[in-house]
Image (spheres, rainbow, N blue to C red):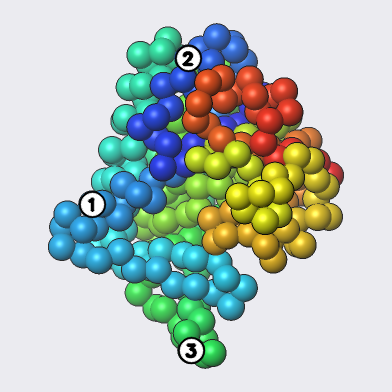
Amino acid sequence: MLVLKIGGSMAERSGRLAEEIAALGEKIVIVHGGGPQVSALEKATGREPRYVFSKDGFKTRHTDSGTMENFVMAVGGGVNSLLVRQFRKAGVNAVGISGASGIVFAKRKILVSFENGREKIIRDDFSGKIQEIDSAPLLALLQAGFVPVVSPIALGEEFEALNVDGDRAAAAMAGRLKAEKLLLFTDVEGFFSDFPNGLVRSARKSDIAEFQKKASAGMKRKLVAAGEALEGGVQEVVICSGLGENPMKKALEGGGTHITK
């Protein structure tokens, strides 16, 4: 079994990937992002996207109640529906589902920003830390011949919708489903030691901490997700481009950055 994460930046350009998945015929679960689409909807509704940075350099969207409403619409509705249509067009028996539909359970976390050398607690935030994955709905869909396409929205302890990181949600699902591989598709070729030079072809889990010192904010999260997936029992994580010709074939045959235990 494979778990794939498709970044929001490539959601509208995933047609070739869909065609490959249709031809592969393997059990696959797809998790997607939607950052650009959320930001676009924020601006369209008169809201400026806001972000906070942690002390370690991690970038997180400030998700207040209004942003959470836009997140559900843009990610759970727009991106999810778009991907299902693209995959269906390619012959993939895709079914869209929200992580908040009893699959991804999370605890609302306290968001802390680091500004001007000081830490600041952000209280009006609906970001979540994943606590549990219920694999039963996913396994039922897979057994029935469907390809689940899951949005990174979680169900909170008070049954509220929470924004969770798509890469880490994919990692948690991959571990829970005992997937052999997690493929993190994005719009760059993989992890670079000195971007745009120095593509790292293979690495071990023990290298991740050092890589994070050189990674951009978005890549930092993919590296964290890779570590969590490997810790959860996934054999291999591939960070790779989902664009161009045969992205799936390239990823499975050595393209991108391959990380193992």
Position above or below: 4 against 161:
above
Q: Mark 2 points at which residue?
A: 19
Q: Quadrant of residue 51?
A: bottom left
Query: Which label's residue is closer to the chain start, 2 or 3?
Result: 2
Query: Which label's residue is closer to the chain start, 1 or 3?
Result: 1
- Density class for disc 1 (Cα within 10 Å; few <14, some 14-19, many ≥20) is some
Q: Name the residue under label 3.
A: 116
Give me the residue at 38% from left, 16% from top: 88
**Amino acid type of the residue tagged 3 in the rendering:** Asn
Q: Disc 1 on helix, strand or loop? A: helix
Give me the residue at 59% from left, 23% from top: 248
Query: Which label's residue is closer to the chain start, 1 or 2?
Result: 2
Position above or below: 256 against 115:
above
Left or right, 259 with respect to 96, comes to: right
Residue 41's tag is: 1
Point out the residue furthest to the front here. Answer: 197
